[in-house]
Amino acid sequence: MTDHTSQAELVRRSLKGRYRKERRFRAYGIVAIAIALAALVTLFTDIVGKGYTGFLKTTITLEVTMDPDLMYLDDPTDPKQVRMADFVAPLVAAVGRALPSATQDDQDALRRLINPYASSELRDALIENPEWMGTTRTMSFLAHSNVDVYVKHKGDAAYSIKLTDQQQAWVDDLRARELVETSFNDVFFTSGDSRDPAKAGVLGAIVGSLLTMIITLVLAFPIGVAAAIYLEEFAPRNKLTDFIEVNINNLAAVPSIIFGLLGLAIFINLFGMPRSVPVVGGLVLTLMTLPTIIISSRAAIKSVPPSVREAAEGIGASKMQVVLHHVLPLALPGMLTGSIIGMAQALGETAPLLLIGMVAFIVEVPEGLFDAATVLPVQVFLWAGSPELAFIERASAAIMVLLAFLMSMNALAIWLRKRLERRW
Amino acid sequence: MSTVSSTITNKMQAPDDKAMPVTEDKVMPVTEAKPEQTVLEEGVTVGTPFADDPKFKLRDVEVFYGETQAIKNISLDVARNEVIAFIGPSGCGKSTFLRCLNRMNDSIDSCRIKGSLLLDGQNIYDSKRDVVELRARVGMVFQKPNPFPKSIYDNVAYGPRIHGLANRKSDLDDIVENSLRKAGLWNEVKDRLDAMATGMSGGQQQRLCIARAIAVSPEVVLMDEPCSALDPIATARIEELITEMSESYTIVIVTHSMQQAARVSNRTAYFHMGHLVEVNDTSKVFTTPEHELTESYITGRFG
Amino acid sequence: MQPLNLLLLTMLLAAVAYVLGSARSRTLAMPLGGVRHLKSLPGYYGVRAAIWCGVPALVILGLWAAFEGKMIQSIVVGTLPDTMIPDTAGEASLLMSKIGNVANGSLPPGFVEEPVAKAAELLQVLQVQSKIYMTGLVLAVALLAGFVGWVRIRPLLNAREQVEAILRWFFFACAGVAVLTTVGIVFSVVFETIRFFEQVPFFEFFFGTSWSPQLALRTDQVGSEGAFGMIPLFTGTLLISFIAMLIAAPVGLLSAIYLSEYANKRVRSTVKPLLEMLAGIPTVVYGFFAALTVAPFISDLASAIGVEASSQSALAAGLVMGIMIIPFVSSLSDDVINAVPQTLRDGSLALGATQSETMKKVIFPAALPGIMGGLLLAVSRAIGETMIVVMAAGLAANLTANPLETVTTVTVQIVTLLVGDQEFDSAKTLAAFALGAMLFISTLLLNVIALKIVRKYREQYD
C-alpha cells in the first residue's frame, strides 16, 4: 500500500511538466495547420486581388461620323476601296470632338486613347451596314490598354501609368461624362490570345484544353479501366504481373516533365506528328494520367465484395460475365471519381505541354484536333511571363477560370462519390 | 416458469441507493412471463453485487455509443484485492464496462457515460479528475498482446520513464527486473533485454504486457480477455500469474472462458445484453447459479 | 478520305457487322428450335462479327496513319540529287518544310531549285495516292474480314469463348501500356543521351562545375563550345528541394498528427479538404504566386533589413514548392499514422501516457519507416517539379548554397533548352535529354526505395 501511495505521489508530481509538454505539442500541430491554411488563403486572395480587374474591360463611347472624304471611302461593299480606306481618322476625329480642349497637334495623343483594333471593328461594322456611310452614329469601342490600366489602377504603385498628364486629364473628363466606362469583360471569354492585353482572351485556351481533355478522356478512361480489370481479375500471380504493377506505381511518381520528353521524342520526332496540336497533348496527358486512373479503378474493383462475384459464379456465369455484368457496374462510380480527379490533374498540367510545343502564341481559336492550340495553364504561363502588368492581370483572371473548372470537376467527383458509391 | 419466480425472490436491492427504481410493481407477474423468454430488468442484479469496503463503487452506470445503449444501469462493487471475473456472451458489454474503469473509452468520440463511478471514493469521471493519474493507478492488459516495437527493456521501462518514477538508471533497472520477475518472465529474457519485444512468442508478449502494466505499480489491473490469443500452455502460465498477482493487486478480468473464470477469480459477474444479471462467489455461480440466464450460459445453451 | 472519317466509317461497318452477325445466328438457330440451341447467345455472334470486321481494318488504319508521313518523306528525299541530300536532321526538316510549302501552294515553285519543285510535285501526288490506297485497303479489309466472320457463324461455334479471349487479350494489352510507357521513356532519353556523350565527355558532364549551354550560332564563332557541367544544376535542384522539405516536412507531419490524434470530427472534416485543395492547385498557379508575389516580397524584405537578395531567389521557389508539397506529406503521413494499430495506442494510454507521449514515444517510432518513405516520395516530387522553378527560379547556373541567390535546376534547363526552335543534333538539345535521363534515374531510384519501404511497412501491420 505504501508503495502504491508513494508511486501515485510521484506521478502527481510529474504531471505539471508533462501537461505543459502536451499543450506545447498540441500547439505545434495547430501552428502547422495554421501555416498551411494561411498559405492557402494568401494564395487565393493574392490571385483574386491581382486578377478580378481582368474581368472588367474599359470602353469608350464615341459619336463617329463616317465621312467619306475623311475615310477615302465611298462604297464599303467594294473590297478594293475598303483596303485603301482610313478607318482610324473618323475615330480620332470623334475623340477630338468629345474633347474640346484638344487641338490639331494632339492627334497622336488622341489616337492612343482608342484601342488599335477599334478601326477594324469600325470597318467590319461598315461592311455589314454600308448604308451607315455619311451618317453619325454613337458607337462603343474598347479603350486603349493604357487607358484600361489607368482607369482600373489609378494610384496603384505597382502599375506604371503610361498616359501623359494631358491624356489622364482627358480620360478623367470622359469618365466624368460616362463616355469612358468599365463593364464586364466579355472580350476575355470570346477571343483568343492577342499582343494587346485589352483584346486578349481565354477562349482559344479553353477550347484547346477542351480538345486535349477529350483525347485524354477517350483514351485514358477505357485503357485505365481495362488495365485495372486485367490486373485485379485476370492477371495470374507471376513475375510479369508484378513487373507491370511495379511499373504502374513508379510511373505515378515520375515527374510530369519526363512525359513531355517522351512526347517530344516518340510522338513528334519518331512518328512525325505535328507540334503544338491537341492530339499530341492529349496523348502525352493520357500516358501521364493512366497510372492514377488505373490505381483508383483497382481500388474501386477491390471494394466490390467477393460475395457478389461468388453469387454470379454460383449460377454459372463465366469469369468475363461476372466482371462485365456485376463487378464493373458496381465499381464504376469509384472508377469515374478517380478518373475525374485524374482528368483534373491533367487539366492543370503545364510542363509536358511546353516540351511538345503547345506554348506558341496562337490568336486563332482552334477548330480541330490537329489545329495548333494552347491550353489554359500554358496561357497562364505565357501571360505571367509578360513584363506588362495588364497581362499579369489577365493571367490572374485566367487562373481563376482554371480554378473554377478544376473546382467544378472536383465537386462533380465528390457529388458522384456521395451519390453513387455504395457502402458495403 | 419457476425460474422466473426465483428471479423475483432472489432479487437484491442496492442498499444505499435512492435512485434504484426497483419496486414491487416492476416485478413481472408470473402469468405474463413467456416460457422461452426470460425477463431482464434494468438495474436488477441477483446475488451479491456489493461489498463493504469497495475499491470501485459503481452505481447506475449507463454507456451509450451514439444512440445505442451498450450498458444498461449497472451497479457493482469491486472489493480490494479480489479477482473478479466478467463473463457473458459476445457483445454483452463486459469489455465496454471494463474500459470505463480507467476511461479507455475517452478516445471514442461517440461514447457517453452516465452514473457514478468511484475509485476509493473519488469520481473517475469527474471533470477535474486527471486521466493520466487514474491510468497510472488502474493499469490494463489487452486482448491481443500489444508490445511496443521496442526492446524488451524499453517496453517495461516505458511507464516508469513517462511517469518519472525512477531517478537513476539503477532504479529503473530494478523496476524492470522486479516487474519481469513478477510476470515470471525474468529467467526467460534476462539475457536478451535489448531484443525486440515483437520477436517474442505470443505468451511471452502477453506476460511482457503484464510486466509493463505492473511496472508503474498500479493498484488495479484490468484484463480484457488476456488469454484469448494464446495457446493452452501460455494460458496456464498467465493464469498462474494472475493468482500470484492477486495478493497485491485488485484484478478485474474479462474472459470468454468459464473454466478460466472458475480457476482464477473470487467472484464472477455475469453480463447479458448490457445488463449485469448476476454476481456471486465464483464457486456459487458455477455450481448453483441463481439466475436462469446464468444457468443457461454456464450449461452452454448459448454463448 | 481523312483518317478520322475513315475511322468513323469503319466503326459504322463494325456496327453493321454486329447486327448482321447476331441476325444470322438467330436465323441459323431457327430450324434447330430457337436461340437456346446455339452454343452462345446471339449477341456474342454479333460482337464476334464486329471484331472480325473492325479490328484488322483499324490496325491497318493506325499503322498507315502513323508511318505515312515518314515513308513519303523518305521516298521524296530519295528522288533528290545526291548533292541536296541533307546531312543533319535539322537540315532535313528545313528541306521537308520547304518541299511541303511548295506542295501546298504557299511557296510558288519558281522560287525554289528545280529538284525541289519536282519533289514537291511528287509529294503532292504521293499524298493523294496514299490517301486513296489507305481508304481502299482499310475498307476492303473491313468488308472482307467482316464477310468471312459472318459466313463462319455456326450454331456450334462458341462465340462467347472467342469474344472473351479477345477481350482478355485487350485487357492485357491495356495493362501493358504502362510497361510500354516506361519503355518509351527509356527509349526516348537513352539514344539522345548516348549521342550527347559522343559530343561531350562523360567526365565533364558529371563533374564539371560550370553550365552554359549557349552554343554559338555559327560554328566558326569564338567560344562556340558550351560548358556542360551538371554539378551546379543538381546543387541548385537540391537547394530548392531542401528548402521545400524544410517547410513541407514539419508542417505536413505536424498537421497530420494533429488531425489524426487531436482534432475532433468537425475540425477534421473541414481542415482536411482545405489541405487537399492545396494539392489540387495546378503547379503553374504556384509558379505565378512564387514569381510575382513571394519573390518580390522576399527581395523587398531582404533589402529592408540590408541583405541583398536576388529577385529570383532560391528561397522564393523553395518556399512555394514547400507549400505545394505540404498536403502530399500530410496525407501520406496520415495514412502511415493511421496504419499503426490502435492496440499500441491503447497500450500506451492505458499506462497513463499523455497523447503527446504516446505519439512521440510509441506511434512515431513505429510509423517512422513509413514516414521516411513518404518523405522520400515528397523529395522525388520536389526534384521533378518544373513549373514553379521555371517561373520563379532563374537561368543562371550558380554554384551556391545561399538561398537568397539565384540558382537554376535540372527541370528549368530541360524546358529552356527544348522550348522554341531546336536543332536536333546540337549538344544543346541533346543535353536536355541527358538531363532528362539523370532526372528520370534519380527520381526512379527514390521512388523505388520509397515504395519498397512503404510497402514493407504496410505488410508489417497488415
Image (cartoon, helix red, strand yellow):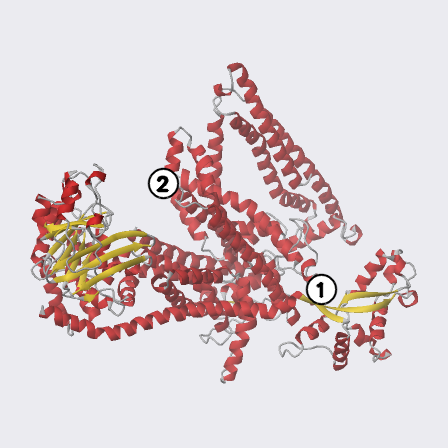
Q: Residue at x 62, y 67 (%)?
A: A52
Q: Secondary structure at mark 2?
A: loop
Which of the pair B118/C253 is nearer the observer? B118
* Residue ID for mark 1: A199
Q: Does residue B60 appear anywhere in the picture?
A: yes
Q: Does residue B231 appear anywhere in the picture?
A: no
- Residue A346's label in the rendered image is none
User: In the rendered structure, are the residues bearing label 1 and label 2 in contact, judged by CB atoms less than 8 Å apart?
Assistant: no
Residue A87, position as x, y percentages in the image: 84, 65
The disc, 1 or 2, on the residue closer to the chain's N-terminal end is 1
Residue C191, position as x, y percentages in the image: 51, 53
Q: Residue at x 50, y 76 (%)?
A: C405
Give the answer, above or below, for where C35 lies relative to B127: above
Q: Amino acid at mark 2?
A: Arg
Task: Report whether C49 appears left or right of B172.
Answer: right
In the orientation shown, which residue stands out farthest toward the front? B25
